[in-house]
Amino acid sequence: MRLDKFLTECGLGSRSDVKRILKKREIRINGKIEISPKVSVELEDKILHNDRVIEYKEMRYYIMNKPAGYITATEDKKQKTVMEILPDWVIKKNLFPVGRLDKDTEGLLLFTNDGPLSHELLSPKKHVDKTYYVVGEKEISDKDMKTLELGVDIGGYITKPSKCERVEDNIINLTISEGRFHQVKKMLHAIDNQVTYLKRVKFANLQLGTIELGEVVEVNREDI
C-alpha cells in the first residue's frame, strides 16, 4: 500500500494533509524518516508520526464516557457533537456513534466504523441490554421498581420486562433491552416520577467502570 493511502486510512487527514506532514519530516518507517508519499509500506512496518505508532486497523472500536451538553451525532451546524470530544489519537475516518444518548445524558457511548456490528447491537430482535444509573426526583419505592420491571405504558407502548437494582431511596440501576426515544425518562414519568440525572453505565458487555468523564478508551470487538 502507498504510504499516503496508508496514513489517510489511519485517519491522519486528507492526502494533502498527509503530504504536508511528510514534508515536515514527521513520519518514520522502521526508524528512518520518509518524505515520499509514493513509497510502498507493509502492515508489518513500524510507522511513527512523531513519536506515536500508527497502526492500521480495518475495524475500530472506542468507548467514551460522554459528558452532558453534547448531542449524539457525527455533525451538526448549531450544536456541539460527541465527535468534537474525540482526542487526536482516535482514527476518526468513517467513525460513528452506535445509537444515541440524549444531550443531557452522560455515560457509555460506543464509536465504531463496523456497520454490521452496529446494526446487530441496535436491532430490536437482539434485545441487547443497556444499564442506566437513574436518579429520580422523588423516592422510587419497591412497588415502583416492580412496576418498572413488569413493563409500563410510555405512550401507547408497553415496555418489555426490565431489571431494577436499588442504589439509594431515589436512585436505581435500570437495565432495559430496548432503546426507544427518551425511554428511561418516560418510564420514570409512568411511575409519577422524573429523572434528574441519567448515566448509562453498561452497554452489551461493555462497562463504564472508572473511565473519567470525557475520556475515550479503545476496545476490541471481543470486549463488546
Image (cartoon, grey):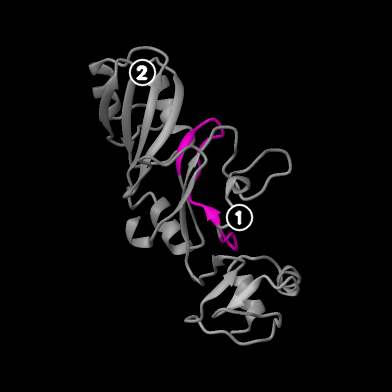
**Residue under the image location 48 percent in, 51 percent down:** 98
Image coordinates of residue 202 in percent, x first then y, are 35, 42
Name the quadrant of the N terminus. Answer: bottom right
Is 198 drawn above or below residue 206 in the view shown?
above
Q: Which residues are magenta?
A: 91-108
Q: Is residue 184 left or right of residue 215?
A: left
Viewer-nearest of labels 2 and 1? 1
Q: Is residue 216 left or right of residue 202?
A: right
Looking at the image, do the residues carrying marks 2 and 1 touch, with CB atoms under 8 Å apart?
no
Label 2 and label 1: CA atoms lie apart by: 43 Å
Q: Residues within 10 Å of mark 2 (few under 14, many from 20)?
A: some
Is 36 drawn above or below residue 223 in the view shown?
below
Residue 155 visible here: no
Residue 74 visible here: yes
Task: Give the residue type that dot 1 points to.
Answer: Asp
Name the quadrant of the C terminus. Answer: bottom left
Which label is found at residue 215?
Answer: none
Image coordinates of residue 171 in percent, x first then y, are 34, 21
Q: Is residue 111 left or right of residue 209?
A: right
Q: Nearer the viewer, residue 11 or 21?
A: 21
Q: Magenta: predominant secondary structure element?
A: loop
- Residue that carries the numbered disc 1 in the rendered image: 88
Which quarter of the picture shows residue 200? top left
**Residue under the image location 34 percent in, 49 percent down:** 204
Image coordinates of residue 49 in percent, x first then y, are 61, 68
Assign a secondary structure to mark 1: loop
Assign a secondary structure to mark 2: loop
Is 51 magenta? The answer is: no
Indicate which disc, 2 or 1, sits on the residue closer to the N terminus: 1
**Residue under the image location 28 percent in, 34 percent down:** 162
Is 214 drawn above or below residue 23 in the view shown?
above
- Residue that carries the numbered disc 2 in the rendered image: 191
